[in-house]
Image: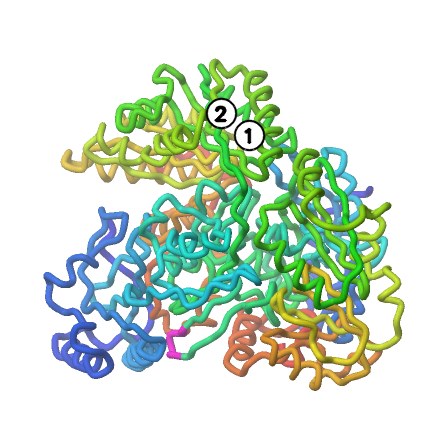
Amino acid sequence: MDEHDLGKALQQQVLDAFEKENPLNITGSGSKSFLGHVPHGQTIDVFKHRGIVNYDPRELVLTARSGTPLSKIEATLADAGQILAFEPPHFGNQATLGGTIACALSGPRRPYSGSARDFVLGCQILNGRGEILRFGGQVMKNVAGYDVSRLMAGAYGTLGILLEISLKVLPRPAASITVTHECSAAEAIESMSALLGKPYPVDAACHDGDHCHVRISGSAQAVSEARTKIPGETMPDAETFWAALREHEHPFFDHRNTLYRIMVKPATPPLPIEGSWLLDWGGAQRWLFSRKDFSTIRHCVEQAGGHVSVFRSDDRAVELFQPLPAPLLALHQRIKSGFDPKSIFNRGRLYGNL
Amino acid sequence: MHTHFEAAGVALPYSHENNTILIRSLQNLLPKESVLTDAEDLHPFECDGLSVYRQLPLVVVLPETMEQVQSIMRLCHAQRIPVVARGAGTGLSGGALPLADGVLLSLAKFKRILNIDPRNAMATVQPGVRNLAISEAAAIYGLYYAPDPSSQIACTIGGNVAENSGGVHCLKYGLTVHNILMLKVVTMEGELLTIGAETLDSAGYDLLALMTGSEGLLGIIVEVTVKLLAKPERAQVVLAAFDDVMKAGEAVGAIISAGIIPAGLEMMDKLAIQAAEDFVHAGYPRDAEAILLCELDGTNAEVSEHIMTIRKILTGSGATEVRTAADEAERQLFWKGRKSAFPAVGRISPDYYCIDGTIPRHQLPHVLRRIGEMSAEYGLPVANVFHAGDGNLHPLILFDANKPGELARTEEFSRRILQLCVEVGGTITGEHGVGIEKIDSMCFQFQSAELSQFHSVKAAFDPHGLLNPGKAVPTLHRCAEFGAMHVHHGQLCHPELERF
């Protein structure tokens, strides 16, 4: 892989944009361009700003430039028997680390091992004034200053351009199997919730409409021990199944309606919204294809104490993210203007007024 | 010692008359016994766990409802009175040090566990609930709250959030930031905000991460929802002795390389071992140069499997002795030695100063060698206790505060150790926070533009700078005065110059 440090060139582009108050659309491979509102502004391309800057398996820390392909990072980690424990979806062959962190995307393992943001240890960013800044670091424990690096995760690039990211990485579990049993969504929610109170090394659990699948990963002994305690058949080729679920290539996702992402407490009973449901993250993250409108769905999800966003839709001019209460939105705006006073980065990608 | 605090904002002129008005207004908001003004009542609040810094506050308030906190904050905001929040006061960086012209807001009365929800593996508690009390309340469901700072019997969850507290198990289970879901926070203006959600993420920016570890500078935490985990079936600890600290360091790398993440991995050097052994008789080998304590947890079979592997690795790394705790009592005893290391060192020296840097683990030999050299230079002995799994180093400098100049020398030595941590790619604080103690060392770690970015975050929450002013993030002016040279990638601006 070609390694390039384009930090200075990107800085110059931001300085120019700051000067002219030109909005910039931060782009890597474009694999996440379907997320959030339609980006506008001049493209600033971080795709070629790539390379693994530092990786010592013994430190459990990897530092890479934001344009580094996830596949490259995962292959490098695999050589040392390690993984990105938040199991990020790629949504495209060329998906980059920067886009993954900016969108805070995590896969099936998320409820059991942590989210993309949980594994962020530090980052180097370009803020809206064109300053290159470092926050956090390359160590596990660091409480010096506000946790700006984790704030970047899920900010959709609206606070700055991620240049370099340090992540905690973990050993790949020595063994893994998936057990499957047929049941309703309500029954799956019960059994997945019950597993939260058990000391088994469960690291993924979902209900795909008619089956509950539970993945158990850990030492060989731990897996075979837990296998006897969790009911169901062993799933053949489970790796393919979880990868398809993670990448939205499972047949469930072969659908034309709007895809909603619904977050609730995991034990929440099935919600009474018409549509096609898949429950991931042990019931905590639920995917819904529905013709119902956003506000109807939102009302129902809010009643259950959750929140909802539009994940994939043909119509992206409408509201896509759960609206924020006024004082919280005002706080977001003040934070945004502290990082990006002229609002040049990914204007409106997350919320219209950010 | 610092006596000057930079209170930002436009406070009312500090006068007896204005103070009387403020106290009367507070008495109108709270029951009489919840507003303390007599010197004898204020004394218990004059310091936190870092007792070399002491200051009586103008007034202490002890609200017990969110509404009371909101009205206190509205009043202080309107009158531009600085506010310092305080939990149990166990912090080690002076983060809860009061201000002479400020209100000290104690959350001691917020001590109810509001809800334990085993089906969703979460608990909602008030900020004054003790860390350990959460695990105790969740135990009947087979659940517990993972972060376990050494002060967990006394420290409160609100303070844990403010400091992003860790503990001996954080390599495997994470810090506070990884184990909380939602906060209710009262802003300086008195607004009640919900940050995060009962769900695994929430809409908008990750303000939960921003609030965690913000040392009381962004808001007053009035409710915390934490994640609970299933209690592991079994925990077991292996003790290994080494005749060379470097070999112990190598063993840590070898364990990680073998694909095992121990629940805890602690190292102590000879001085710390001997002090602990003399104090609690943990059964440590007194002649060892270093010991490692490696805790494994999980299912029965998993722990047995890992112990076999770990023993092999430790022996292969040159351990002179490897012992697995025979039973739970011995496991507790092994830990007691480690957990008593600070007071044990306190017994062999009139005073000790605890340092909290984090370094990339492979830098340990270099850092220990440099600390040894500086120890000789300053004539101050150092005992080293190390959270070896995550690189968090706690050198304890032994000194005598009654000897003129020795505290100042100790503080200078401490700053140089922190500077060394930054030079090797680490940080000035792993888990104790910056507080007032390390405010000048922040100038080593961050450049002006980075500090300015922190100030912009602060201003977004608290534009008048009334929340815990003078802590955690230094002003640019302070760094300039401190004569800071910015260390970046280990490069000093003028490495040839002697700075201290």
| Numbered circle sitting on residue B118 | none
Q: Main secondary structure of the magenta part?
A: loop
* Magenta run includes residue B175: no
Amino acid under disc 1: His
Residue range highlighted in magenta? B186-190
> Is A216 located above or below residue B225 in the figure?
above
Q: Quadrant of the C terminus of chain B?
A: top left
Amino acid under disc 2: Pro
Q: How dense is the environment of label 2, judged by Cα within 10 Å: few (below 14), some, or many (20 and up)?
A: some
In this rendering, position of residue B487 left or right of residue B108: right
Q: Quick one: SS at disc 2?
A: helix
Residue sitting nearer the eye, B57 or A83? A83
| Numbered circle sitting on residue B365 | 2
In this rendering, position of residue B286 left or right of residue B174: left
Answer yes or no: is residue B208 visible. Answer: no
> Is A316 located above or below residue A236 in the figure?
below
Image spot of residue B126 (x, y percent): 38, 66
Image spot of residue A130 (x, y percent): 62, 62
